[in-house]
Amino acid sequence: MDDEREKLPQHPSQEVDTSRRQFLRNLGVTAAIASLLSSGAILEERRAKRAQAQTSQTPPGGETTLRGTVAVTLQVNGKQHTLQLEPRVTLLDALRDHLGLTGTKRVCDRGSCGACTVLLDGKPVYSCSVLAVDAQGKKIETVESLAQGEQLHPLQQAFVEHDALMCGFCTPGFIMSLKALLDKTSQPTPQQVKEACAGNICRCGTYNRIFEAALSAVQSMRRGG
Amino acid sequence: MPQQKTKRIKTTITVNGETREVEIEVPDIEAAWGDPKNMRWLGKRIPRVEGADKVTGRAKYTYDIQLPGMLYAKILRSPYPHARIRSIDASRAEKLPGVKAVITDLTREPKYVGEEIAAVAAVSEQVARDALHLIQVEYEPLPFVVTPETAREPSAPRVHGGQNVSGGNPRERGDVDSAFRRSDVVVHEATYSVPARSHCCLEPHGLVCQWQGDKLIAWASTQGIFSVRDELAGALGIPASNVRVICEHMGGGFGSKFGARAEGVICARLAKMAGAPVKLMLDREEEQLATGYGPGVTAKVKIAATRDGQLVAWESETYGTGGIGGGANIPLPYIYPVPNVRTRHYDIATNIGASAALRAPGHPQASFIMESAMDDLAHRLGMDPLEFRLKNDPNPVRQAEYRLGAERIGWNRRSQMGARVPGAIKRGLGVASAIWGGGGGAGSRPTVRIEPDGSVEVRLGTQDLGTGTRTYVAAIVAEELGLHIRQVKALIGDTDYGYSGASGGSTTTASVAPAVKMAAMAARERLVAVVSQHLQANPADIVLADGKVTARNGSEKSLTWKQACALLGKEGIEVQGEWNANLQGSGVAGCQFAEVEVDTETGKVRVIKIVAVQDCGLVMNRLGVESQIYGGVTQGLAMALYEQRLFDEQTGRMLNANLEEYKLPGPLDMPDIEAIVYDNPTGKVSGMGEPPVIPTAAAIGNAVFHAIGKRIHSLPITPAKVLEALGKV
Ligand code: FES
Ligand code: FES
């Protein structure tokens, strides 16, 4: 069981020197080039993967679906919750649909955008890629835990002051990725800040202000603000 | 009856993302914003008012709406790019426990992979998905075509039955042929192209629909709550007044979220059938397949200038694809006036879904094509590309902007960079320009309410796409009434709050802000009438500032805001405002400079710096306007280096319908961005959400050309294309 948990998908900032975006970029380039040569082969592979994914949800024959729930106990933002969930429910959906914690966003649902980032025992993870049952026994922190009443966390405060958000849909994910960094590094370099959120995408284009905000939050935390 | 004074103005209007310039007659009522120097809020750096809600996760987007008994809907989509449906059997889906409603009548002939075939509402998303697998559809696959090149061939399968290629009427002025033949001109010919690009809004398209008797409430992730309302009412055959649409926060639209769209009607129908609220949010693959994209376009271009650099002729033939729709035309020649012009545009039908407006529709494409040709021609002329532009761009604002931007990027370093400088890593500088309408239009009906206890509310059925609408709506009222912005509650995003138009074409600010200003002025006037009596002062002497109401008549008698409002009586003040043309301006100019580094061994392009100089009219919120510039540049960079929808010719499927292989820049790809707000002393408000995205890709392309001495003729500029241009692969 413990061995299984070790295999939880790692958030990119936990990888040592290749950023996830870099990895994806390479993958994308490869795929794009390959598509010109033999898009058929890629498609086949894609189909096979999809078929595999379907069989894991749908038993052979594809007609009946295994059904039923299990009791899952999650420790979220310092509170224990016991939920009745289908085993296939992700941590993201458990938080959003079963606990009403909708601050954590669902964008790609497959580990490529970072909008669903939460902390699991202090480490940032993509909650869309973790099953709720696998998150049992771990400390889960969501964006809802940062502010104390009306008092925003310095990171949140800095995001607002620097306008590090536009539509705001990516924002909770970025904040959690950066919170993980600031929890373990009190004086991060600008490069560390960028790397900490390398697995998060913002389509509105707020990246530069996010870096600015994070570095200013560091300053205000050091001043004890 | 005295005749009301009117005047004719040129402005832009946007209908479902299609923006065009029109001339309209408007009432000529005197009104002015006043001197920006005396303003406490407007033009300053105002953190957005919903910021705290968004950073804490409290902000409720459509995706976050949860209602008691709510069902989840999923859509079954066509796996074929073109097919006839022989039969659909949903009986087994209907019998699956937890399934509450099924629709199978959406189409008989899907024309792209991802078109809606059937839909299901069930107690959970998982069950809804399971149910889709149980719907049996018998398809008869039909011939299809997904690339414009193939679609142009005479033998290509017909997308709509008729010809795939339409348009091609020449638009002509001057004497093009003889201009190209002149002995004193230099001619350049080339083909440039931009691929189709997806919007990739992080919040997907979708709605939550709830019926109350014959009334419908729809929460929608949309750029136009009223256009969603009208389309839903029309499709469902109910009065518009029976539909209420709410969008408090939304996670990006970029031109793809107008109207109810297919999923809106499906969601409302399922909710009606099931007798329960239904949530229908698209997943990421559906977003890529079925919610539109900015059309791709290929341009065959011929351009000529005299040897001393005066543009004389332009000819272009463009082929664009809006898929099963049209709308792939682009404005050419772009920016620079050319006396002799011939353009021909062809729209090509393909089986890739319908295109949609994408931030500054047509303009970034036009900019890349025009500015690439301009640079290539400048190169032939042996002229500095900036000098060439200064010579051919009569716009006085851009003339000033070019100089400002050139200084900030360090254009004078240009001669020490470029292909001839030894070393594997080459540096280059490039420049490109933008123009946008940004004018507004009549229609917005904001209400300002002042309560006797001093609380102030402004209500308007506009929406905030993340552009900061809510913030400047509050700021305008606070400015007028001399209050702190926190004392004004701005309620937007609900059709119950009074009409306002859809947010597209950067028309929102120039439409909304003047109307809110007029409402606030009317409210102020009423308040002043009451207070001036009480203070025995002339209304003209009453000043509202710093939360106080003061008589500037020597007596200097003053009331606190609360004391003043207490004089109002129970009913308080409630006034509506109407748009005033004298408060809006249009035509915002911009230019951008790019510095890049190209690794000639790997072909990788790194953008080091972008300087963006943008005219924004009268600035409402400086912080918000800068954010729009950052956002535009970031999306322009994505277009330059990464974005492209890829289709497989054999199967007609999109190969990168996700967020990994459909590449977007991440934090590590970001250059330094200098956003310079060019303060235009017109004193008029205009929209500027779109222009900053226009010239970025062109400026980057030109910088790459400078760096390696080779033109990359098609976007995105991938390492493979760079290596190919360098003859290394
Ligand atoms: S939603 Fe989890 S990474 Fe995108
Ligand atoms: S603020 Fe909209 S996606 Fe980041």
Image (cartoon, coloured by chain):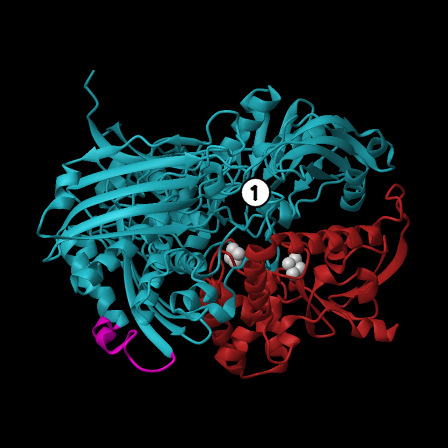
Chain colours: A red, B cyan
Residue drawn where x is 48% and y is 51% of the image: B466
Q: Nearer the viewer, residue B296 or B594?
A: B296
Looking at the image, residue B424 lies above or below residue B124: below
Q: Position of residue B150 (x, y in %)?
A: 49, 40
Mark 1 packing: few (<14 Cα in 10 Å), some, or many (20+)?
many
Q: Position of residue B106 (x, y in %)?
A: 66, 28
Relative side of A188 to B192, left or right: right
| Subunit of label 1 | B
Residue stretch rendered in magenta on the structure? B410-424
Looking at the image, residue B91 lies above or below residue B541: above
Q: Position of residue B245 (x, y in %)?
A: 57, 34
Residue drawn where x is 46% and y is 67% of the image: B719
Q: Secondary structure at mark 1?
A: loop
Whether residue B335 is visible:
no
Q: Is residue B421 magenta?
A: yes
Report which quarter residue B705 is drawn in.
Answer: bottom left
